[in-house]
Image (cartoon, rainbow, N blue to C red):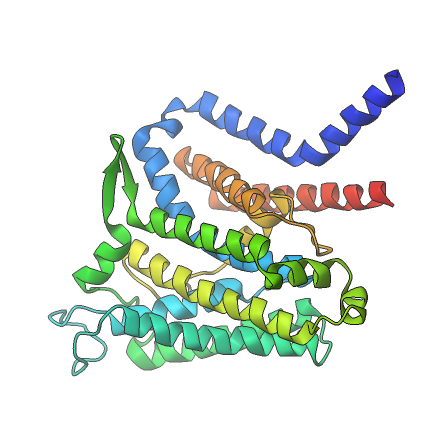
């Protein structure tokens, strides 16, 4: 009986170790500075987390499929800079395209989605058809995207930040409403809508079931008649749409964009997924876990910034969290075997 209880306790600690440790870090940060949980700071954290939630959900689908995407941040930045350059106010003196008429928000967003999907679908074909390792394929796509993005920035305005956005664009992400006396930003409501959309796809559609099947055992999926290439293309297509939308929102939220927008975002997204229980081996992961991972990671990051911790130290903390999360994930796999 005692051995059974010890086994259950060990299993509980192993399955929840990363949550326990990270929550302890948050408790320490709040203890050191209680203002971290003020209404204003919580509102800011939610706004800051919104584009990252969308990005993490996109990356999460790819990881569940058995892949990874190191190009996610750069593709997000590409979408953000592209939309920003087309959505400057018509009376802004440093407008890039002086003769361009005022565009509806949906036009640049749609074009950005097409552009992002081109790269993500190309990535999917490299992995599923040509059998290129996901790490190498995503690294190559990342370099191509960043090089193209930098050339576009140099051609536009010598890589200077693009600003002076149309009010409709700024308000789309920067606006807010009062809910039960608490100010909630529009951008966070968009993140909630995307979360529900992805939850429905993963849990209520045949694509979601096939995604988990391919990620869990690709060979068995092929034998059972699943078109693996098609599943890869659809999952990466959805990722491309989400990358574009998160980049569109992030540029509007920050108020400017350049070729450095999105740098390192893919690492935060991967970390949030792993912290949230998405296995790097594929086939395992939940929307709720990813959301929890994003919020925990964002709380820690913002807490360190709020306390004035050196940015280099923040990188060290993030790296240690990723290593610890992957180590715990590996131990879960070994335990099951």
Residue most extreme to the top: 2
Residue 24's spot in the image, x, y percent? 58, 26
Residue 192's spot in the image, x, y percent? 41, 48
Q: Is residue 243 left or right of residue 47?
A: right
Regarding residue 140, the answer to whether it shows in the image is no
Residue in front for this viewpoint, 206 or 265: 206
Image quadrant occupied by the N terminus: top right
Above or below, 163 relative to 21: below
Image quadrant occupied by the C terminus: top right
Above or below, 262 relative to 152: above
Residue in front for this viewpoint, 31 or 12: 12
Residue 170's spot in the image, x, y percent? 23, 58
Residue in front for this viewpoint, 33 or 169: 169
Regarding residue 71, the answer to whether it shows in the image is yes
Where, by quadrant of the figure, is residue 33 drawn?
top left
Q: Is residue 205 left or right of residue 159?
A: right
Where, by quadrant of the figure, is residue 3 drawn?
top right
Number of dots carrying numbers: 0
Q: Is residue 259 left or right of residue 289?
A: left
Residue 242's spot in the image, x, y percent? 46, 63
């Amino acid at each position: 009986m005692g051995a059974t209880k010890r086994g259950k306790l060990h299993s509980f600690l192993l399955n929840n170790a990363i949550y326990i440790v990270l929550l302890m870090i948050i408790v320490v940060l709040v203890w050191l500075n209680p203002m971290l949980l003020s209404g204003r700071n919580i509102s800011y954290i939610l706004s800051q987390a919104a584009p990252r939630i969308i990005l993490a959900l996109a990356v999460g689908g790819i990881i569940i499929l058995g892949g990874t995407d190191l190009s996610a941040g750069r593709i997000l930045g590409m979408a953000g800079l592209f939309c920003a350059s087309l959505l400057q106010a018509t009376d802004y003196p440093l407008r890039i395209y002086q003769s361009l008429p005022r565009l509806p928000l949906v036009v640049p967003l749609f074009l950005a989605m097409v552009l992002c999907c081109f790269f993500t679908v190309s990535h999917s074909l490299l992995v599923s058809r040509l059998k290129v390792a996901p790490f190498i394929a995503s690294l190559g796509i990342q370099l191509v995207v960043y090089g193209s993005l930098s050339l576009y920035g140099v051609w536009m305005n010598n890589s200077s930040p693009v600003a002076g956005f149309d009010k409709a664009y700024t308000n789309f992400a920067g606006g807010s409403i009062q809910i039960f006396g608490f100010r909630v930003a529009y951008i966070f409501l968009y993140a909630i809508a995307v979360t529900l959309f992805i939850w429905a796809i993963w849990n209520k559609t045949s694509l979601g079931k096939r995604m988990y099947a391919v990620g869990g055992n690709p060979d068995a999926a092929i034998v059972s008649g699943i078109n693996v290439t098609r599943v890869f293309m659809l999952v990466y297509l959805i990722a491309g749409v989400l990358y574009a939308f998160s980049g569109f929102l992030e540029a509007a939220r920050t108020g400017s964009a350049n070729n450095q927008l999105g740098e390192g975002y893919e690492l935060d997204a991967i970390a949030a997924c792993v912290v949230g229980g998405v296995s790097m081996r594929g086939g395992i992961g939940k929307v709720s876990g990813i959301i929890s991972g994003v919020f925990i990671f964002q709380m820690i990051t913002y807490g360190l910034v709020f306390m004035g911790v050196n940015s280099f130290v923040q990188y060290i903390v993030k790296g240690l969290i990723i290593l610890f999360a992957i180590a715990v994930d590996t131990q879960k796999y070994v335990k099951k075997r």
